Amino acid sequence: EVQLVESGGGLVQPGGSLRLSCAASGFTFSSYWMSWVRQAPGKGLEWVANIKQDGSEKYYVDSVKGRFTISRDNAKNSLYLQMNSLRAEDTAVYYCARAGQQLAVYYFDYWGQGTLVTVSS
Amino acid sequence: AIRMTQSPSSFSASTGDRVTITCRASQGISSYLAWYQQKPGKAPKLLIYAASTLQSGVPSRFSGSGSGTDFTLTISCLQSEDFATYYCQQYYSYLGTFGQGTKVEIK
């Protein structure tokens, strides 16, 4: 059974940093593109970043470029999102999601349960 | 960036109804469209990809159609567990964008 379990969310002050983790199991993690998708309270879904199987390609939504870094450790079956210079508008539930096809742009066939990041003073 | 517009934003329906949700892309996306269902406090669930291919395990009352810029999600006979918010997503271009969502409520 495919499982994605996020952790690392919490309350952080504006300008602060946070590192999210996603532990994957039930599939060959190193064979899939992976992504972070977020959802602000009461709002829709926004694709934040994605990373190729070997980490050689990474893409970000414009609003987080230069502040967020996606990475992965295939030996640990884990995906990460380092978030720096956090802003109030980054407040959201962050989901780890698996690519449904082996291309740089894709739909998501499995999602984690999400972890809430709140940026507030 | 490609913009996805869903209509309506919300509506009320009754169990047993046939319902249709529309998603329009700001430019052609071939059939690179997915539909998701999300219930409160839960992660989205993939229903359909490639505009009309049903994800494994999804009930056959769900169907999708369309190509280019106009797409529809149809639920043939609404069940109680189908009351949720539905999102379309294009994956034709960089960082596939989502529609704003359509909330299906109980009448």
Image (spheres, coloured by chain):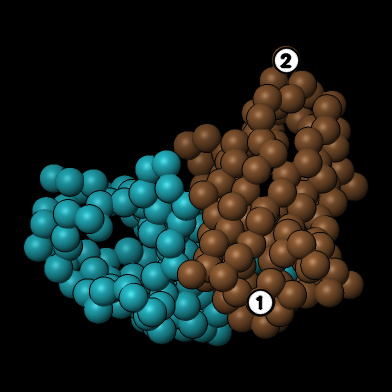
Chain colours: A brown, B cyan
Residue at screen point 47% across, 52% down: B43
How far separated are the C-alphas under marks 1 and 2?
Answer: 40 Å
Q: Quadrant of residue A102?
A: bottom right
Q: Which chain letter matches label 2?
A: A
Q: Can residue A119 be seen in this view?
A: yes
**Towards the viewer: B105 or A96:** A96
Q: Could you tell whether A27 is left or right of B76 in the image?
A: right
Q: Position of residue B104 (x, y in %)?
A: 27, 51
Q: Is residue B97 above or below residue B11?
A: below
Q: Is residue A53 above or below residue A13?
A: below
Q: Where is residue B82 in the image (x, y as percent from the top left)?
A: 25, 58
Q: Nearer the viewer, mark 1 or mark 2?
A: 1
Residue topped by disc 2: A121
Q: In which quarter of the image is the C terminus of chain B?
A: top left
Q: Position of residue B44 (x, y in %)?
A: 46, 56
Residue topped by disc 1: A28
- Helix, strand or loop at label 1? It is loop
Residue at screen point 40% across, 53% down: B38
